[in-house]
Amino acid sequence: MLPYGLLIAEDDPSMVRLYKAFLQGVEGVSLLGVTPSGEELLRYFRRGGRAELLLLDIYLEGSNGVDILRELRGMGVDLDVIVVTSESSPRTVGEAMRLGVFDYLVKPFGGSRFGRALDDLVAFRRRIDRVNSRMSQDELDKLLGGGEEELPKGLHRSTLKGILSLLSCFGEATVDRLSEEMGLSKSSVRRYMDYLVREGEVELRLKHLGRGRPVNVYRLPSDL
């Protein structure tokens, strides 16, 4: 199978060199090019350029990566995106997740985390490319769960990653806040949180936020 074409949208030359070094350990990816600006990235696709994967920084020359991604989605550009950035505000993470990013890496991160993100994405693309007919719900659940432990029915790995990224940014959060940021119903968020607590990936604590009864607050364990 041919490698997937990758674009890097990053305006820091030192980070570009680092990504190129990290990419040497990733199979199934071919670097197509590097652009420091959002406008240059948009021009590439407007002129008919193609790519399957994109590493996207939020801070680009003269533009915001989330705005650029929104334009790409509006143009119908079909590619998977991994955000690589120092920007970890809850609002930005939430916006990026709602625009369908596959993963969100906060600088500084190591080569193992970078490699895992690319490996997971390449594996996902290959599974999608092998499908040549309509999929059942069970098949979709297995696809979205990847090669990892199978999730309970109705839960999806990408949503779990989004919730964990938000908790990493917030420090802690209630179901109400996660529901608002993720654009999910409170009942859906509770199902994800119940699962994460059972798996030990999230801690549940009672906290007094004012008068009245305490509320459930979720946070990442200190050793994660």
Image (cartoon, rainbow, N blue to C red):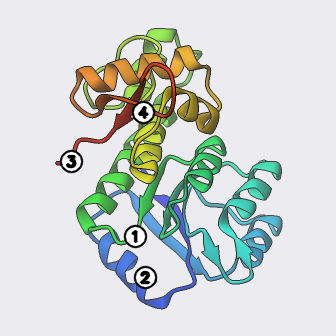
Identify the residue under disc 1. 107
Q: Which residue is mark 2?
A: 15
Residue at the (61%, 56%) spot, across then down: 92
Mark closest to the chain's N terminus, 1 or 4: 1
Label 1 vs 3, first from the N-terminus: 1
- Kind of residue sitting beneath label 4: Leu
**As drawn, is 102 to the left or to the right of 208?**
right
Residue under the image location 65 percent in, 49 percent down: 95
Q: Which dot, 2 or 1, sits closer to the camera?
A: 1
Q: CA distance from mark 1 to mark 3?
A: 19 Å
Query: Residue 142: x and y, percent?
Result: 38, 20
Q: Work out how far the residue at label 3 is from the one at label 4, CA to CA, in angstroms.
A: 18 Å
Please tell me whether mark 3 or mark 4 is closer to you in this view: 3
CA distance separating discs 4 and 2: 28 Å
Under circle 3, the secondary element is: loop
> Does the image show residue 65?
yes
Q: Nearer the viewer, residue 153 or 140?
A: 153
Query: Foreground: 224 or 65?
Result: 224
Please name the amino acid that badge 2 sits on: Met
> Label 2's element?
helix
Residue 79 image offset from top left, x and y in percent: 62, 51
